[in-house]
Image (spheres, grey):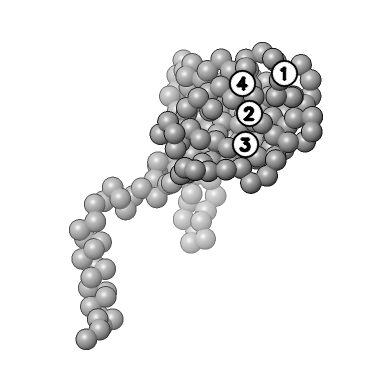
């Protein structure tokens, strides 16, 4: 008739044995996010180089075991968002399965790095944060970091997951890169910002030139 509890446990044991190890270790999962939303969600957004990395202990877990993290000593080039004090150290988990982020060290490669502040010149990053090599960013993305992304933080960017999809409120911009281009770094991510207009609604704005006023109308150049 029905399966016994012993049968269920036996099936689960076989499943664990047969399931590929890489699937068991891939615990980090990130949803695609538009660069502007990543900027608005972050405590700190900087342009920087990683010079040195090492493994350090960072307190203990609930069982008393030491928690290890990777510490990157960095050279900050510019801060787009964050505290008055420059960031000196970046921390991340030791493995990608725990959402740890690997940065090239040696001080040659420049990154745009968004993450959470830990105070005292420190921040924490994960694989889910907006972290790209500086050279891979579009001209518009670099321009938007200075002002336009911040101007749109009161707007909501909703990711379209299947067509058709629609906005549900006037303060919303629909992000379609993932479903249309099958690419989270598509045209809207590279070239558009969601900006609040003079009537309080939000709309996509494209352009590399600095905005002329605090709230943009759709016809602004």
The answer to whether the residues at label 2 and label 4 have Cβ atoms under 8 Å apart is yes
> Residue 153, percent across and down?
69, 35
- Residue contact between numbered discs 1 and 4, judged by CB atoms under 8 Å: no
Q: CA distance from mark 1 to mark 4?
A: 10 Å
Which class describes the residues within 10 Å of circle 3: few (<14), some (14-19), or many (20+)? many
Q: Residue at x 58, y 37 (%)?
A: 174
Q: Residue 206: give its label.
A: 4
Secondary structure found at label 3: strand
The reply to whether callout 3 and callout 4 are in contact (CB within 8 Å) is no
Point out the residue furthest to the bottom here: 1
Mark 3 → mark 2, Cα distance in angstroms: 7 Å
Residue that mark 3 sits on:
173
Mark closer to the observer (1, 4)? 1
Q: Nearer the viewer, residue 146 or 93?
A: 146
The residue lying toward the viewer, choosing from 212 and 58, is 212
Q: Which mark is residue 220?
A: 1
Instruction: Report the residue that reaches farthest toward the front.
Output: 164
The quarter of the picture where the C terminus appears is: top right
Residue 204: mark in rendering: 2
Of the two numbered discs 3 and 4 on the same chain, state the one appearing first in sequence: 3
Q: Secondary structure at mark 2?
A: strand
Q: Is residue 47 above or below residue 11?
A: above
90 sits to left or right of 1: right
| Residue under the image location 70 percent in, 40 percent down | 170
């Amino acid at each position: 008739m029905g399966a016994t509890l012993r049968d269920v446990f036996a099936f689960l044991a076989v499943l664990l044995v047969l399931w590929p190890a890489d699937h068991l270790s891939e615990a980090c999962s990130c949803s695609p996010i538009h660069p502007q939303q990543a900027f608005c969600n972050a405590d700190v957004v900087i342009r920087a180089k990683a010079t040195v990395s090492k493994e350090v202990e960072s307190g203990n877990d609930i069982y008393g075991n030491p928690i290890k993290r990777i510490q990157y000593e960095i050279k900050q080039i510019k801060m787009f968002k964050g505290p008055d004090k420059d960031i000196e150290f970046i921390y991340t988990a030791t493995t990608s399965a725990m959402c740890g982020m690997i940065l090239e060290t040696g001080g040659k490669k420049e990154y745009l790095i968004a993450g959470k502040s830990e105070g005292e010149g420190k921040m924490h990053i994960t694989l889910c944060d907006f972290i790209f090599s500086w050279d891979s960013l579009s001209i518009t993305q670099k321009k938007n970091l200075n002002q336009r992304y911040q101007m749109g933080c009161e707007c909501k960017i909703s990711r379209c997951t299947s067509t058709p999809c629609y906005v549900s409120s006037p303060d919303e911009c629909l992000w379609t890169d993932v479903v249309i281009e099958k690419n989270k770094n598509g045209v809207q991510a590279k070239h558009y910002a969601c900006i609040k207009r003079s009537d309080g609604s939000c709309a996509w704005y494209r352009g590399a030139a600095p905005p002329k006023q605090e709230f943009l109308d759709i016809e602004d150049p």
